[in-house]
Image (cartoon, rainbow, N blue to C red):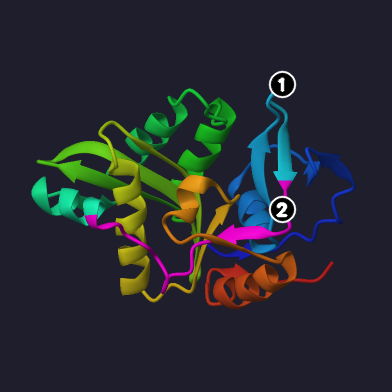
Amino acid sequence: MTLTFLKFSKPKKYLDSLNHSSMTTLDTHLLISAYCQGLFPMPHHETDEIMWYQPDPRAIIPLNNFHASRSLLKKIRKFNWTYTINQSFETIIRGCGEREDTWINEEIKNAYYQLHKDGFAYSLEVREDEEIIGGVYGVSIGKAFFAESKFKTKTDASKAAIYFLVEFLNANHYELLEVQFLTNHLVTLGATEIPLSNYMEMLEKAVSQDKRLQKIER
């Protein structure tokens, strides 16, 4: 699949101090174009309308600075937690969508199911004796990974998901792990904020390595 980038105008609306703009029905072309230009979608918490965000500053986890606590590493070893990639995407996004504070609606699920089928959305499943106990899903373009959401059914399994994700990304020479917004939970794992301008420079370098994309100017 070869895609061309769409060129968006700068968002003009604001919601909770975040830039956003409403655009059309989600599809693979629109989603990949948006991610390559530093935007990501979320439904409005009251109307379910898809809004597009470009926070400044932007949260990332530096792939050389992930922090795994001793207790997490001990638990991973004790229960022999392992991970798989892309073996149960629907299970992972469904698990994320069942959280109390989820923003993942049916439109988002269907859009990312298709993105997965097209080879751009990945899932990571955390397993204990083959049972899925947590996981994370996100978007992979070139050497950039955009983490969307995670969940757990056992304590610390979502932290393990990020630990294993960083392991996978480093093994495959990724350069950027974006996590949208900084939270106290992510800070404990080594997440930090950087100015949007710096993020866009890192993003351009990372996604430009995806040979499925063809950039055009409009």
Count neighbours of disc 2 (C-alpha within 10 A) and say few if under 14, some if 14 to 19, many if 20 or more. some
Residue for badge 1: 46
Tell me where residue 178 appears, x and y as whole percent: 54, 59
Disc 1 to disc 2, C-alpha distance: 20 Å
Which image quarter is the C terminus in? bottom right
Q: Residue at x 54, y 31 (%)?
A: 104
> Image check: 84 left or right of 15?
left
Q: Residue at x 72, y 47 (%)?
A: 53
Q: Secondary structure at mark 1?
A: loop
Q: Residue at x 13, y 41 (%)?
A: 130
Quadrant assignment, res 192: bottom right
Residue at the right extreme, as displayed: 12
Q: Which residues are magenta?
A: 53-70
SS assignment for the magenta stretch, majority? loop
Residue for badge 2: 55
Say if the magenta span includes residue 157: no
Q: Residue at x 30, y 39 (%)?
A: 134
Tell me where residue 183 appears, x and y as whole percent: 55, 47
Q: Is residue 48 visible?
A: yes
Reading the chain from its start, which is encountered first: label 1 or label 2? 1
> Image check: 6 left or right of 14?
left
Q: Is residue 118 visible?
A: no
Q: Is residue 54 above or below residue 94?
A: below
Tell me where residue 29 appears, x and y as whole percent: 63, 53
Say if the magenta span includes residue 69: yes
Count neighbours of disc 1 (C-alpha within 10 A) and say few if under 14, some if 14 to 19, many if 20 or more. few
> Image check: 160 left or right of 127?
right
40 and 161: which one is in front? 161
Tell me where residue 18 appears, x and y as whole percent: 77, 45
Q: Secondary structure at mark 2?
A: loop
Q: Amino acid at mark 2?
A: Pro
